[in-house]
Amino acid sequence: MSPRSRCRLAARQPVHPKSKNPLYSGGQPVIERSLGTA
């Protein structure tokens, strides 16, 4: 899998806005950190 396709797949996943994401703390996307994509 190429890095480009990875980014496309990640972008396709439904991600809540920062303001509405309760897992967002300190400006760091906790979801991305847990998935290891950040």
Image (cartoon, rainbow, N blue to C red):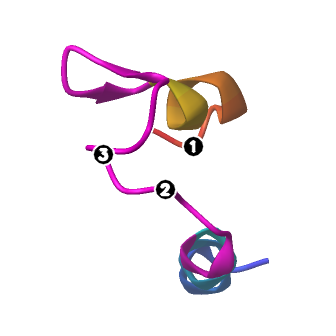
Residue 27 location, quadrant: top left
Rendered-image quadrant of the C terminus: top left
According to the picture, the residue beneath numbered tag 2 turns out to be 16
* Residue 37, label in figure: 1
Tell me where residue 7 appears, x and y as whole percent. 54, 74
Residue 17 location, quadrant: bottom left
Type of amino acid at the residue the image marks with label 2: His
Badge 3 density bin: few <14, some 14–19, many ≥20, Cα 10 Å: few
Residue for point 58% across, 32% down: 31
Looking at marks 2 and 1 on the same chain, the residue that comes earlier in the sequence is marked by 2
Residue for point 54% across, 60% down: 15
- Residue range (magenta): 11-29
In the visual, does 27 lie left or right of 17?
left
Foreground mark, 2 or 1?
A: 2
Could you tell me how far apart the alpha carbons at marks 1 and 3 are, in whole angstroms?
Answer: 17 Å
> Of 35 and 30, which appears nearest the observer?
30
Residue 20, relative to residue 16: is it above or below? above
